[in-house]
């Protein structure tokens, strides 16, 4: 398996969540109400899986390795664009989390913010994933030897192990401090 294959497998799960968000968005718009538990689950998925786990591997390993290589202008531009989209996704997800909390408190305007954020994420992610799968990952592969690619794949797997431990270490530490 190539390193990019693992990232592309993760993309399929992200696409499934985005599809669920799209379906819920249609219901929210027609019904004028939202299930805040769904929104909270989507936020958790986006923060933990899509951003911390998936984007973490892309940014902390793949992009970092590529940053040490002499990329073509086009590949460098595309990597910068993808990084900016990761930031945009983080900000939109944070706004969605805030809107969900406000919705739970009964703030009527929060529903419009939830809809706006979900629309943004549902609109952004499919094209972002397409760019990575079809354009960036194949181009990036050319910068690595087979041995380097295998090493990166192992780095991705170790990254995943560390993320899981880090998440639950933080949960316990927060409980211990009374948080």
Image (cartoon, rainbow, N blue to C red):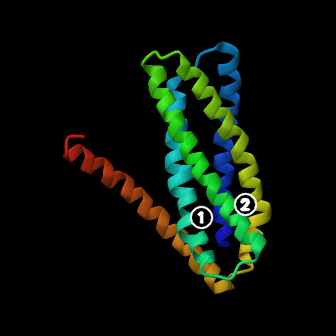
Q: Which residue occupies the foreground of this view, 151 or 59?
A: 59
Numbered disc 2: secondary structure: helix
Closer to the N terminus: mark 1 or mark 2? 1
Q: How far apart are marks 1 and 2 (CA)?
A: 10 Å
Q: In which quarter of the view is residue 104 placed?
A: top left
Q: Are marks 1 and 2 in contact (CB under 8 Å)?
A: yes
Where residue 21 appears, as percent x and y from the top left, is: 65, 33
Q: Is residue 30 left or right of residue 93?
A: right
- The quadrant of the picture occupied by the N terminus is bottom right
**SS label for mark 1:** helix
The number of callouts visible is: 2
The residue depicted at 59 percent of the width and 16 percent of the height is: 33
Are there few (<14), some (14-19), or many (20+) residues within 10 Å of tag 1?
many
Residue, x 79% and y 64% (percent of image)? Answer: 135
- Between 108 and 144, the one lying in front of the other is 108
Q: In this view, does 110 lie above or below 175?
A: above
- As displayed, is residue 110 above or below residue 130? above
Q: Is residue 71 left or right of residue 106?
A: right
Q: Where is residue 130 in the image (x, y as percent from the top left)?
A: 77, 54
For residue 58, the mark is 1
Relative to 26, say whether 32 is above or below. above
**Quadrant in the picture for the C terminus:** top left
Residue 132 is situated, as x and y percent measured from the top left of the image, at: 72, 60
Q: Where is residue 178 in the image (x, y as percent from the top left)?
A: 20, 41
Give the number of the disc on residue 146. Answer: none
Q: In which quarter of the image is residue 3?
A: bottom right
Which residue is nearer to you in this view: 148 or 59? 59
Which residue is tagged 2?
132
Q: Residue at x 55, y 71 (%)?
A: 61
Identify the residue shown where x is 65% and y is 82%.
Answer: 69
Crowd rating for badge 2 (residues with CA inside 10 Å; few <14, some 14–19, many 20+) = many
């Amino acid at each position: 398996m190539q390193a990019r294959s693992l990232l592309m497998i993760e993309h399929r799960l992200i696409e499934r969540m985005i599809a669920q968000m799209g379906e819920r968005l249609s219901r929210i718009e027609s019904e004028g109400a939202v299930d805040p538990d769904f929104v909270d689950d989507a936020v958790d998925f986006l923060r933990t899986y899509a951003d911390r786990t998936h984007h973490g591997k892309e940014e902390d390993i793949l992009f970092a390795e590529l940053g040490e290589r002499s990329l073509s202008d086009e590949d460098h531009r595309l990597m910068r664009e993808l990084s900016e989209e990761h930031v945009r996704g983080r900000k939109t997800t944070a706004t969605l989390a805030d809107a969900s909390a406000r919705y739970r408190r009964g703030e009527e305007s929060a529903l419009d913010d939830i809809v706006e954020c979900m629309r943004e994420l549902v609109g952004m992610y499919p094209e972002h994933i397409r760019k990575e799968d079809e354009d960036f990952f194949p181009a990036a592969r050319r910068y690595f030897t087979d041995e380097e690619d295998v090493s990166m794949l192992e780095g991705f797997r170790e990254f995943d192990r560390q993320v899981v431990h880090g998440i639950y270490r933080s949960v316990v530490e927060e409980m211990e401090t009374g948080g």
